[in-house]
Amino acid sequence: MFKNLMITKPIAAQPRVDAGEPVEGSLGGEVGFKRTLTAKHLVMLGLGAVIGAGIFVITGTAAANHAGPAIMLSFVIAGFACAMAGLCYAEFAAMIPASGSAYSYTYATLGEALAWFVGWSLVLEYLFAASTVAVGWSGYTVSFLDSLGVHLPAALTQAPINFCTHEAAVAGACEFGKFVTTGALFNLPAVLIIGAVGILCYVGITQSATANAIIVSIKVLVILLLLAFGAQYVNAENWLPFIPDNQGGDRFGWEGVLRGASIVFFAYIGFDAVSTAAQEVKNPQRDMPIGILGSLFLCTLIYIAVSAVLTGMVPYTTLGTAKPVATALEAYPSLLWLKTLVEIGAIAGLTTVILVMLMGQPRIFFSMAQDGLLPRFFGAIHKRYRTPHKGTVLVALIAAVMAAFLPIQLLGDVVSMGTLVAFATVCLGVMVLRRTQPNLHRPFRVPAVFVVGTLGVLACLGLVATMPLLNWIVLLVWTVIGFTIYFVYGYKHSKLRQQLPPR
């Protein structure tokens, strides 16, 4: 039984293509996608996914509730872990250009059961990521509409429950980190944006590549304006103490810095989303490493710079909102013009993040369904739009429900945990494959692979260890549900196992 669970998919069964060559049928089943993307598209896709959520949403809550001004160190730590994983992703993506991302890589190296676990973790990652960013999008949209004199009812702009922030705890309103009721019904703007982006993903994203590039350019321009003008209002006293004293648990101190790193790791999932588009790339062996590593390097520099400016402009305790950049700019009347631009840039930028998340999740479902581990429903391709339309509808519906009723801090935490688990598995898998199949053609090779891979595993699992008990419970419940589905359906219908000779 255990040996059957560890069965691996031969690398030869993975799609191998040259530039511009259409995909033929394979065990991986990546049939029906158009190969239209280039390295430039991938870098822009990565920037579209990465530049947004971390800057416009997660940075503030992580600084306010855990790391303080040392959120800059949190980004350095998370960036290091991500760099190690990114190198391993690049080797896999060039060698196995499959739409299943870490799921496909694990299937080829560590076995079907672990591949299922990673794929199921990626489901958790993308679903919660889309919901998290939608909540942030709602915060900036409501703020922008308020500046125009359009005021939406508070009952329709936030989740009915939330976490008590540090600022509220200091005021004596509640106990830090505990759930509190908000009196709201549900987050309507978050639901609407997921619905709109879901429709776009349904009809196809190839046509939106140019639009994505334009929006990314606007995002980067807005961030550069923030850095240029916001830096003039930085007060160095706001950076002191740089690492606030620990006040219990993972609240500030070095524990808070590490906890902050595990949270802001959410910001880096964009390069993982890049790998899910491998089946739509003209020359994946060359372009995938460029897209993954290029977007990762640029985004890390931007994140550290923005976190420095934000925590320097205002006390970190005020940043625990769904719109931290706008919150910082509101403190300076002379920068209200920039606040409006930031809100517009955030609204547009976060939209592209949701787009990439809702694009990536159905393609992971698609790969798992083509391998027989999920019902054929998830592997259906629309005859006209050539997209995994059924999976897209299902993912959008679930993401909309979570965005409507769950707070942003819980959503962001769970995303980071699923991401870290997947990244650690990829780092382990690339080392295993170097041992088991050293002669495979590798268009890109990780330098000092056993050092890089080991550091990647330790860094990712170390950040997972800082997660609170609630996150572990969520992951455990999610894993039990996943393996129940696997043993009830996936194990019996695995196409790879069906091709084995009878015993």
Image (cartoon, helix red, strand yellow):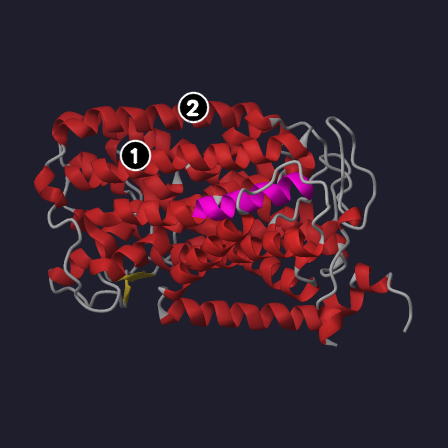
Badge nearest the viewer, 1 or 2: 2
User: Is 379 placed above or below 345 here?
Assistant: below
Left or right: 311, with 462 as reference point: left
Q: How far across and down, in percent of the image, does residue 148 sit?
A: 27, 30
Instruction: From the top left corner, tell me how far across and down residue 65 is, in percent.
Output: 24, 56
Q: CA distance from mark 1 to mark 2?
A: 20 Å
Q: Which residue is mark 2?
A: 217
Asked if one can make out residue 348 in the rendered structure from this viewpoint, the answer is yes
User: Front-most of 196 and 285?
Assistant: 285
Which amino acid is tagged 2? Answer: Ser
- In the image, taking residue 58 as reference, residue 256 lies left or right, namely left
The circle on residue 251 is none
- Of residues 365 and 423, the one drawn nearer to the viewer in this rendering: 423
For residue 477, above or below residue 14? below
Instruction: Tell me the residue that label 1 is attached to.
Output: 144
The residue under the point 33% across, 40% down is 56
Residue found at the far right of this picture: 502
Q: Are marks 1 and 2 in contact (CB under 8 Å)?
A: no
At 20% from the left and 25% from the top, the residue drawn is 229
Which badge, 1 or 2, is on the more N-terminal residue? 1
* Residue 495 left/right relative to 458: right
Disc 2 is placed on an element classified as: helix
Label 1: element kind: helix
